Image (cartoon, helix red, strand yellow):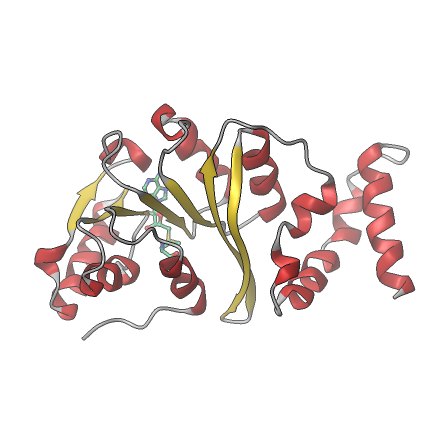
Amino acid sequence: MLPTLDARLAAAAELVRPGEPVADIGCDHGKLTAVLAASGRYPKVIGADLRPGPLAKAEQTLEHAGCKDRAELRLGDGLSVLTENEVGSIVLAGVSAQTTWEILEKAPWVFTARGPRIIMIPATRHDALRRWLWEHGFRFVADRPVQAAGRWYAVMAAEYTGETHEPTFAECLFGGTGVWPEGKGYADWQKAKLPRMRLGVPDGSALAAEIDAILKEGTER
Ligand SMILES: C[S@@+](CC[C@H](N)C(=O)[O-])C[C@H]1O[C@@H](n2cnc3c(N)ncnc32)[C@H](O)[C@@H]1O
């Protein structure tokens, strides 16, 4: 039986480049790997994880979905399981923002124009990951707010262009989510975290001014 994807992974699947190989890095339960493999839309589907336990779970999921022969499972750290140009899309879902960029930093071949599309669902610090992507020459293809299991997520897709951008704090906090109907709910959730974040920011700093402006705007609406 084919597994059901939550709204987060379903949105990530929609962003995979059709007709090109794809890798699901940190595949864990293997649900996304199985759905991608069963779709028949990709010439190669790779599921990979750092640990053997999750990979065994993924193998079972593929078996139950009847598509074990349509996906390859690989054990290893981040993108070390891939070779340059092997895939057109890389999914990195459910790991922290920092783990996401550390995985990318270890694979210099990602930082090339016409390199792979990186599809990410950071488990933490959406703002920090957006900043890292802009500052390292990626452009956003998508930044979609999604609610799953009572939590907000941002499903991001980015491609390397080499053109860097110094974003404002507001850009990092909300990204491109405002164009979606769910954008308001996502923005409210992001704003709710600001008073706590503000406690650790020195008064008089540029960041403090930006946070205060966003908070003020919220109370004036
Ligand atoms: C919370 S699960 C996310 C599973 C799935 N991608 C999802 O979003 O539902 C995170 C998985 O990433 C794996 N992981 C963490 N760091 C990794 C790394 N450097 N390379 C590959 N996999 C990693 C973990 O072993 C774990 O199975």
Screen quadrant of the C terminus:
bottom right
How far from the left and from the top, in percent, is residue 170? 73, 46
Screen quadrant of the N terminus:
bottom left
Q: Residue furthest top?
A: 108
User: Number of marks in the image?
Assistant: 0
Residue found 39% across the figure and 62% down from its top: 9
Q: Nearer the viewer, residue 199 or 8?
A: 8
Residue found 49% across the figure and 45% down from its top: 96
Is residue 169 left or right of 102 when viewed as pictured? right
On the image, which quarter does residue 65 sit in?
Answer: bottom left
How far from the left and from the top, in percent, is residue 186? 64, 63
How far from the left and from the top, in percent, is residue 132? 57, 34
Q: In this rendering, is residue 129 above or below 6?
A: above
Residue found 44% across the figure and 68% down from its top: 7
On the image, which quarter does residue 64 sit in?
Answer: bottom left
Q: Residue furthest left?
A: 69
Q: In this rendering, is residue 65 above or below 168?
A: below
Is residue 69 left or right of 62 when viewed as pictured? left
Is residue 197 left or right of 61 when viewed as pictured? right
Is residue 211 left or right of 26 when viewed as pictured? right
Residue found 89% across the figure and 36% down from its top: 203
How far from the left and from the top, in percent, is residue 62? 16, 62
